[in-house]
Image: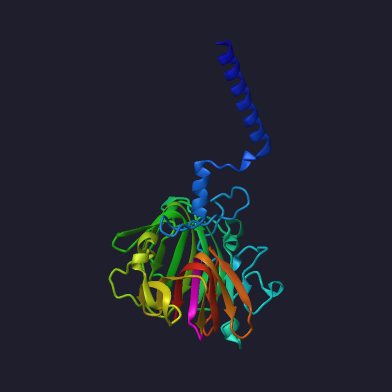
Amino acid sequence: KGHEHTVLTSLALLATLIFTLVIERHDFSAIRCPRQLHGDILDGFPRLARAPVMRRQTKGTTSNAVLANSYLDSLSGATPFSAPPTYGSSSPSQVPDEPVMDPAASDRSTAFAHAPLEYFGLDNLAMKEPRATADWGGPQEGSRKMADDGVLRAGSWFCSRGGWPSPNQKAHTEIFYVLEGHASISDADGVKHYFGPGDTVTIPKGHTGRWDIVSPIHKIWAVNAHDRIEETANPIRVQVDHFHTSFAPRSLTVGDDPLYGTNSPVVASNTFYNVGPTKVGVWTCPPGYSISVKNGAKTFFHLLEGVVYVVDGPTGDARRCVAGDTVVLQEGWSGHIDVMKSAKKIWTTAA
């Protein structure tokens, strides 16, 4: 028994020594719990598991009660930011903080704007007083414009919890992609349309109804300021395209490219709104392909996955775009889109 006790004691000492050596030779601070790993999965944009979720760029904790009354009214009052959008025709030092594409530019093919997600961080949105027409909650809003050529506008908007009626006819068609939050928009007859992260919402020109924001919402938007109401339905209805349905592979068609007007065996797309001068859809392409664009339409896109280069034809200037970036191409733009990593983007064109 004494021998067995000695052997067991020796084994215990040996195990303790090995454990001590492992602790000394390794840094376990990088080990992540399942919750942290889940967060990393979300930040990696899994294609089919869930909608892309972008990490909001803010300084510390930003209060939801910081923002503006009407985001379209506050577009011109944005806060300066150290990394403004870049133009294909300008060097970074020449780019204004609040770029507005000039529709009278002599060389229109160089007119494109590019903004990273950080440009729309909550700390960089214009702020105003709470919405006066709210009938519940205290919705406070903020926005920042990225581009405006008089017809196609683009930017970002945030609003805290609350609801309000919207009885006046919408003056334009708006398309937006939801980064965060949950809300609903009701039509004139009370039908509600719910949406959340990863969804794309189209509000046609002429729509009336109401907004109800359940949890603070942050979105990237584009507006087509076309002349007349194109919808014929009464009442005019909001359209919500969910990430898990309209963006799923089963909903995509390979071949004709509705965005760039080519017939490609590798591009897959789905145009889920096509009324009058406004088209909205999702576009995907594998890596290693270059898409040529000649005399293109006014185009907005928000990159959901992958890496692409937007290359201006006449100048050769290129912008590297990653997931979360937003690009606006002016009418008549020519160049090419080079896909470096499998890309998926939400897009709209305006005529």
The residue most toward the right is 93
Q: Provide residue 226's location: percent of width, then percent of height.
A: 43, 79
State the image quarter where residue 84 is shown: bottom right
Relative vertical location of residue 107 with respect to residue 80 in this rendering, above or below: below
The residue most toward the front is 3
Magenta span: predominant SS is strand
The residue most toward the top is 1
Relative vertical location of residue 72 with respect to residue 226 in this rendering, above or below: above
From the viewer's perspective, is 330 left or right of 133?
right
From the viewer's perspective, is 11 left or right of 291?
right
- In the foreground, 8 or 229: 8
- Point 49% across, 73% down: residue: 300
State the image quarter where residue 184 is shown: bottom left
- In the foreground, 163 or 289: 289
- Point 57% across, 75% down: residue: 310
Residue 121 in view, yes or no:
yes
The residue most toward the bottom is 106
| Quadrant (top left, top right, bottom left, bottom right) of the N terminus | top right
Q: Is residue 200 magenta?
A: no
Relative vertical location of residue 4 with respect to residue 340 in this rendering, above or below: above
Q: Provide residue 292's location: percent of width, then percent of height.
A: 51, 82
Q: Is residue 296 magenta?
A: yes
Q: Which residue range is magenta in the image? A: 294-304
- Point 40% across, 75% down: residue: 279
The type of colouring in the image is: rainbow
| Quadrant (top left, top right, bottom left, bottom right) of the C terminus | bottom left
Residue 212 in view, yes or no:
no
Q: Provide residue 202's location: percent of width, then percent of height.
A: 39, 68
Q: Provide residue 147's location: percent of width, then percent of height.
A: 56, 73
State the image quarter where residue 280 is shown: bottom left
Relative vertical location of residue 180 with respect to residue 147 in this rendering, above or below: above
